[in-house]
Image: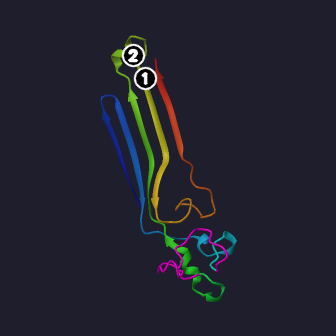
């Protein structure tokens, strides 16, 4: 796991961002094969849409679901790569020039917007690669504000 951060400033503007990267993680996703989560592979349920083999779709990614092709190793299909890249935080702000503020008796005015958990790229079929498949995903937070100093 790792993180890349940056902070850029130009003429009163400030931009900050953090990318969080996790690679090489394998997690079990019960939606892929357990009946209680709607992923049972007997052809009745398909909780998360899978690329099953059918005569019309001769793919090689998933065997054809049917009650008679039960395999004792079927549970292994629930283990998937949970690597991801997430834009964990990004913020943009503007500091008003001091010469504008002296006129109205303020020492600093800064307006900003920021967001957390804005974007995630993963192949893990769930709300989030960080939580259990049946948990709620992490919230996306947006903040708008103004800082004023006299």
From the viewer's side, name the closer residue of 83 and 57.
57
Q: Are marks 1 and 2 in contact (CB under 8 Å)?
A: yes
Residue 59, image x, y percentages: 47, 79
Q: What is the distance, in whole Å, between disc 1 and disc 2 at their CAs? A: 8 Å
Which dot marks residue 127?
A: none
Q: Using the rendered view, name the quadrant where residue 2 is placed.
A: bottom left
Tell me if residue 9 comes above or below residue 100 in the rendering: below
Q: Residues within 10 Å of mark 1 (few under 14, many from 20)?
A: some
Residue appearing at x 42%, y 11% in the figure = 104
Secondary element under disc 2, as helix, strand or loop, is helix
Task: Tell me if residue 53 is in the magenta stretch.
Answer: yes
Residue 10, image x, y percentages: 30, 33
* Earlier residue among tags 1 and 2: 2
Residue appearing at x 48%, y 48% in the figure = 118
Tell me if residue 54 comes above or below residue 135 in the rendering: below
Residue at which label 1 appears: 109
**Residue 64 left/right relative to 12:** right
Q: Which residues are magenta?
A: 42-64
Residue 123, image x, y percentages: 47, 65
Q: Residue furthest top?
A: 103
Dominant secondary-structure state across the stretch colored magenta: loop
Here the colouring is: rainbow
Residue 45, image x, y percentages: 66, 73
Q: Residues within 10 Å of mark 2 (few under 14, many from 20)?
A: some
Residue appearing at x 56%, y 63% in the figure = 126
Which dot marks residue 101?
A: 2
**Quadrant of image for the N terminus:** bottom left
Q: Residue furthest front?
A: 56
Q: Residue furthest left?
A: 10
């Amino acid at each position: 796991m790792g993180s890349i951060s940056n902070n850029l400033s130009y003429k009163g503007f400030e931009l900050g961002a953090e990318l969080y990267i996790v690679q090489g993680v394998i997690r079990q996703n019960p939606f892929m094969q357990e009946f209680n989560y709607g992923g049972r592979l007997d052809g009745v349920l398909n909780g998360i849409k899978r690329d099953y083999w059918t005569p019309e779709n001769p793919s090689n990614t998933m065997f054809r679901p049917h009650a008679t092709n039960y395999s004792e190793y079927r549970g292994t299909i629930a283990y998937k790569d949970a690597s991801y890249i997430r834009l964990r935080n990004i913020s943009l702000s503007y500091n008003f020039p001091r010469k504008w503020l002296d006129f109205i008796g303020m020492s600093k005015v800064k307006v900003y917007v920021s967001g957390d958990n804005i974007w995630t790229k993963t192949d893990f079929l769930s709300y989030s690669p960080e939580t259990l498949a049946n948990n709620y995903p992490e919230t996306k937070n947006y903040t708008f504000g103004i800082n004023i100093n006299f």
